[in-house]
Image: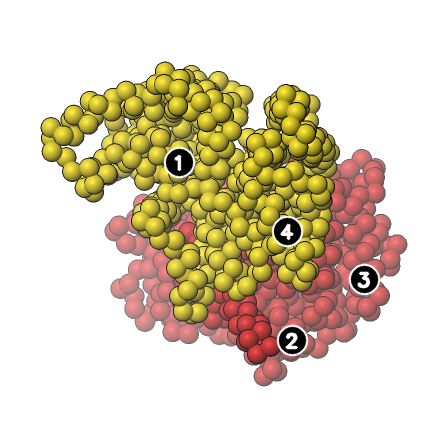
Chain colours: A red, B yellow
Amino acid sequence: MKKTLFNTIKCILFLAMLAFCVTAASILVKRKDSDHKYADFFDKAAQDQIDVLFFGSSHVINACNPCVLFEDYGITSYNMGGHGSVMQATYWELMEALNYTTPKYVVVDTFLMQKDYKFLDVMEENATEDDPNVALEQLHLNMDAWPTDHIKLAAVTDMIQSPLRRMEFLFTMTAYHDRWKELTKDDYEALFGRGERNRMFGAEMRYNVERFPKTYPDPEGWVGLETYTVGEEYLEKIIDECQNRNIGVIVTFLPCSATTEDKKAAISAEEISAKYDVPFYYMLDGDIIDLYTDLNDTGHLNALGATKVTQFLGEILMDTGEFEDHRGDPDYDDWQEKADAFYRELADKARESDNLYQQLNYLSVRDVSCVIYINEGSDAFSDERFKNLICNISGTDTFRETDGPYILIRDQSQGKEYVYEARDSGELKGVKTAMGMLNYRPVEHMFRLLYTDEDPDTNYLYDDEHYEYDIQIIVYSQENGEILGRSYYKSYGNDYEQ
Amino acid sequence: MINALLAFGAVLPIAALINALIPGKYRYIWLAIISLGFYFALDYKAGVVLMASILVTYGAGLLIGTIRSENRSFAGKAILFLSIVISVVAMLVFRSGSILGAIGISFYMLKAIGYLIDVYREDVDPERNPIKYSLFVSFFPLILSGPIERAGNLLPQFDKPANVDFDRLRYGILQILWGLVLKLFVADRLAIFVNRVYAAPSDNSGTVVFIATLFYSIEIYCDFAGYSYIAIGAARLLGIDVMKNFDSPYMSGSVAEFWRRWHISLSSWLRDYIYIPLGGNRKGIFRKYLNILIVFAISGIWHGSALTFLIWGMLHAVYQIVGYLLMPARNFVVKKLGIRREGYSHRFVKAFLTFLLVNAAWVFFRADTVDTALTVLRKSLEVTPWIFSDGSLFTHGLDVMDMNMGVLGIIFVIIDDVINYHGVDLREKLVHEGIWFRWAVMILFVLLILIFGIWGPGYDASSFIYQQF
């Protein structure tokens, strides 16, 4: 009897040690994307600090920025969007999230609602061999962070047909054990709970500018999808679930280069929203974004577009009157710190960038003091996208009316934004900036003056090495006028070389 | 068909746990239920073939036993002959899959034929209990890929199965873990390289092809020996001791010795039920050589109906015959050069040459056609050593890290085989080591399999090479 008891204890001890080692190994080799994305969600949900949840595909990930929503409105939110998330994946993401928190509002985007397949590992008849694999790989971002429990079991059973493929979601080691070849310091840090985490509350910002956004015709007669799709079924389930729990719902179709089929899905989404009496926002209409400056690529918004869309949603949310402003509340300091960090990152990118469009984009997103000069004859004067970006910064159409030279000074040193422009032979005199009292005078094609009254010998717009460059950008500190970054670009048609 | 390895992994703990709770004399009933259930779950149509085979050979065994007791030798011989013919035809037909595929039929049929011959020879009594006989044929750890056990060893154990104490449990688990290491860590990793190269041997440089042939020799050993360890370990957890199937075969100093150490259950079966009845080496040199040719031709055909398998078998026969023919000349050289036969260097050279011969034969075993095999052999004679320095070695499915792991696995296998060759069973030694060391090794094995093993989505764990035979 004594021996049996002793042996039983030994067995239990061994199994416990084995379980510990296997769990540690599983954490080590696990792909960390999902954990990174949701690390703050779990923390903030535990503190009951989340007002709004954003759901949808990568369009949401790149369009809804909780840092902007907090900075501008004091509303706390989390971006739960998943790459390639079809509506059933969004539904199960909601179900997982609601297990941890009950937000005041849920914003759900309906991109991909036209998809009419249930199982991600089967998909449609015309799917390539790789499509299901890509879909499942993307689903890992949505699912991996959630613990293996009855909700996750229900989710994978609902979305994945193959019992073997389900296993890779229930026991992630099945999918990730081969990562032993690519382990990084972060993977080991995760063992001790010190792994990296998303610093934008689930959002990801992109910083390119789509040069050639496509536009597609509207559906004939403005009618929605021909058949009732799986996507529609799950949108109804999402609205139903939220309404049952007294959570407000806002349905959107976020801006992108939407195809005719996408637009049909949006029309159907509007019809479903009307049926449930929830607001729907079709953001392709109106002037919420500028298609020529605010897209990162044809499908996704860049940081500038995301800021505009988030501000648009912020106004809608504020109009409900259900949100209090958490700014200044010490309990929400972490939100403020992360919002500040995001804007600091933008300012850093505005100071120096590899790409002219990107740099102009960053300059337009955030209040950064700068001087932008474009010489006469530059191809930039015939580049519509460039014109849009400059006009975004200046807030005027002056740049559209000239062939150069052109100068723009944007100064924030007096607690407010002041923009000064001069075109053609126009001059600027005694412009008060953090650099000093600035003066600008175009002298000849390859020579112009920009100097301060305090230091008239320094010409900021000329140096021997870069005199042939037709575009110059100077970013300076609004506190002390120190030059923080200086970029030169040559234009070749619509291409710009640094 | 559901995944065999996963199904095996799911069934074994349940089978072992319940088996341990049942009184010894009734365990065979539980094991028969679980064995037949396991096989039917894998493929119910193949299950019907299995049941028919059991019925035919069970009935034939009883008949032979009855006739034997009445001393009617011709009738007994006729029934034996008829039942063997039926079994062999069924094996060939259902193995091909042209009518219906029956997984493991080559293994359980040899087991059943061996039983009938044993009954006829009066080496064993006919088994009258149909459940026990069903278990003998269908015992689930052995049904897919052997070892091909004998009735004389297995049936008495069903009457009195051993108690599964902690030593037996530990040893069984260690054998299973080692089998999984061989299969998932070594064999399946090397298979990635081998499959790439064999898919288009002429597109690869010579040394790459040569390495692929070496890797295949290791792969098939680790794959099959790995399965055998799993099967033997699993049987041990159920209180049944099964014969050893591999005994450091690549340490052999001759091809004849290789066959005493490789797939022992098959080679001893062929020896006892074909070679010896044909006269063995008792009827002169010519008959001996002819018998060797016949046995290895049958062995080749048993492995597969393609010509490549027959050539593989015949090559092994020819190796042995040439070896016997050259023996006087070899002895002369050894004597003249004063070579010490028991010296390490001589044994190493013999083992090395034997391995090269076996390696060349495996090329026919692995290749889909004779042409492909000849291309592989021709290409592997082209020496292109720059593959080790220009990085091209790592462009055949195994990157540097995986190649390192593969080589590490081969080193594990060599160390284990060398130690085993000297009569030491590492796993048995380990069972008697201190608890912490034992636990550490077991956990290490599990982690080795889970992290570094080739498994998961896209990997077909059901495909043990020998399951196709």
Residue denoted by label 3: A241
Above or below, A430 against A213 in this view is: below
**Label 4 secondary element:** helix
Above or below, A251 against A292 in this view is: below
Residue under the point 37% across and 42% down: B248
**Label 1 secondary element:** helix
Frontmost residue, B189 versus A456:
B189
Residue denoted by label 4: B159
Frontmost of labels 1 and 2 is: 1
Frontmost of labels 1 and 3 is: 1
Q: Chain of mark 3?
A: A
Q: Are marks 4 and 1 on the same chain?
A: yes
Residue A250 placement (x, y as % from top left): 76, 60
Cα separation between marks 3 and 2 = 21 Å
Tell me which amino acid carries mark 2: Ala
Tell me which amino acid carries mark 1: Arg
Query: Is residue A121 visible in the rendered structure shown here?
Result: no
Tell me which amino acid carries mark 4: Asp
Q: Give residue A496's quadrant in the image.
A: top left
Cα separation between marks 4 and 3 = 61 Å
Cα separation between marks 4 and 1 = 30 Å
User: Badge 4: few (under 14), some or many (20 or more) residues near its Cα, within 10 Å?
Assistant: some
Residue under the point 19% across and 27% down: B331
Q: Quick one: label 3 or label 2, which is nearer the N terminus?
A: 2
